[in-house]
Image: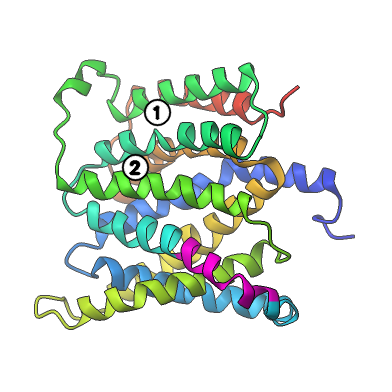
Amino acid sequence: MSLLQTPESRIRIASWLMWVTPALWSVNYIVARSAPGVAEPHMLALGRWALAGVILALVARSELWRERHSTLRDAGRYLVLGALGMLICGAWVYQGAQTTSAMNIALIYAASPVLIAVAAVWWLGERFSVRQGVGVLIAMAGVFHVVVKGQWLALGQVQWVAGDGWIVLAMVSWAAYALLQKKWPTPLGSTARLAAICMGGMLVLLPFAAWEFVQADTPAWTWQATLLVVAAGLLPGIGAYWAYGFCQKVLGASRVAASLYLGPLYGGLAAWLVLGEAMGWHHLMGAALILPGIYLASRPSA
């Protein structure tokens, strides 16, 4: 019997994936910081989702063919989800990362889980207990502790730049992407649905990537750019998006949104391991708040 066949096993796997998914997404922080001067934002995003879409479509080809009529009927929805999840949450994040800081990105994205949780309760009718609300607040405090490096007075010294606008749009877009996936039911499984969304994302990304390609100052495509595409397509692309969609389908949008608070913590670990950035006590203190906060927020309502 498949591990995904019983409701109990699906809940168990989704609960574990909540903790793994942000680690896969942290690879995108490395990609975003490495991309300037190597690959243009929309070209990088198009390559990322083209690779992910082809792989996912091959894996789910039988299901996609079987459900081709319903998929074509819902083509408009997949275009919208592709624009939200692949164009705005993909290329625009790379665009914003060229001028804003990691601290600003983390501060802005810290609002996303709260936005998703509130909208899920108000719009989708999901239940959200007081205990889960307390967990969200504790986790958010941990996030802020990490991004300000334990120096809370540093919040008053944050400088906002044009790139922050791109990240604000991406944060709101991610909330919309997460909520609409839950709002719009589909006969497709997680893999086939993500493949269909990738196709929608490729269509909306294509004209922007083509425009970047013909610009005189666009850097020549290199093996380093290809490596960034492969890394972004496989880990934060297929891995994180599939896992997040599966968890949300099983556990609900409001509960899974809390896992996004692990992003700054995992991002710090990735920067330490890959880029050699120093770890500090603020990371440990942040983890001491984030981890129990997510545990409380992810528990089912009574």
Using the image, tell me which numbered label, if any, was put on residue 143.
1
Q: Is residue 141 above or below residue 61?
A: above
Residue 166: assigned label: none
In which quadrant is the C terminus drawn?
top right
Residue 221 seen in the figure: no
Magenta-colored span: 70-82
The answer to if 77 sits in the magenta stretch is yes
Q: Which colour assignment does the render follow? A: rainbow
Residue 23 locus on image (x, y percent): 49, 47
Answer above or below: position of 294 versus 169: above
Q: Earlier in the sequence, mark 2 or mark 1?
A: 1
Q: CA distance from mark 2 to mark 1?
A: 17 Å
Location of residue 212 with respect to 277 vertically, above or below? below
Label 2 sits on a secondary structure element that is: helix
- Residue 272: mark in rendering: 2
Residue sitting at x 28%, y 76%: 209
List x then y, in percent, for residue 25: 45, 51
Q: Is residue 281 found inside the magenta-colored segment of the image?
A: no
The structure residue drawn at horizontal position 33% and vertical position 59%, both measured from the top left corner, is 31
Write the residue at 63% across / 17% down. 131
Q: As displayed, is residue 246 above or below residue 134?
A: below
Tell me the SS state at disc 1: helix
Residue type highlighted by circle 1: Val
- What amino acid is labelled 2 in the image? Trp
Q: On the rendered structure, is 186 left or right of 51? A: right
Q: Give x and y (percent) for residue 15.
A: 68, 40
